[in-house]
Image (cartoon, grey):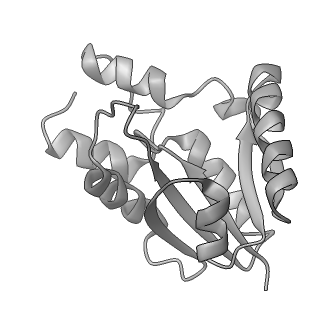
Amino acid sequence: MRKAIFPGTFDPFTKGHHDILKRSITIFDEVVIGIGLNGNKKTMFNVNERIEQIKSVIDGNKKVSVKSYNGLTIDFCNDESANFIVRGVRNTGDFEFEKAIARTNRMLSKIETIFLLTSAKTSFISSSIVRELIFNNGNFKNLVPKTIYEILLKNHLK
């Protein structure tokens, strides 16, 4: 069985993340969305809110689960018996950053990192941009999946 971890902060989960996820489930038998908890990173949404947001998108898909984890992603991969890490790459900056992490992970384990290029229509989207729009009451409707947009509106975020 080919099992992959799709790690990230997902603060919030964007249409770019969703695009990578949809394409990942055509490659792997199972994909675990791993929300990495990094004490040094201040988030807009707590981990339970992010899990709720992502679950609204995966909508019971049996090939996908969402979990949070502390520590190294490769340790989480080992805990989950996953042999692959999936990463979305928007640009050369992303690639260089991710390449260094992938090489380190490969040096420390047998886990392979698979890079998926983002689609042109989502390549400009980042969680940082979405958070900035939310914080400043900008229109972020077309940057996040519909269910997440509705959750955020329900929670009085505009």
Q: Nearer the viewer, residue 80 or 13?
A: 80
Quarter where residue 60 is shown:
bottom left
Quarter where residue 11 is shown:
top left
Residue depicted at 81% across the width and 69% down the height: 27
Q: Quadrant of the C terminus?
A: top left
Q: Residue extending furthest top?
A: 136
Residue 61: x %, y % from top left? 52, 77
Residue 125: x %, y % from top left? 57, 28
Using residue 30 as the reference point, say whether residue 107 is left or right of it.
right
Residue 139 in view here: no
Residue 155 vertical position relative to residue 130 in the rendered view, above or below: below
Residue 6: x %, y % from top left? 63, 57
Residue 143: x %, y % from top left? 48, 33
Using residue 142 as the reference point, say whether residue 156 is left or right of it.
left
Q: Quadrant of the N terminus?
A: bottom right
Q: Nearer the viewer, residue 72 or 94?
A: 72
Residue depicted at 46% across the width and 32% down the height: 142
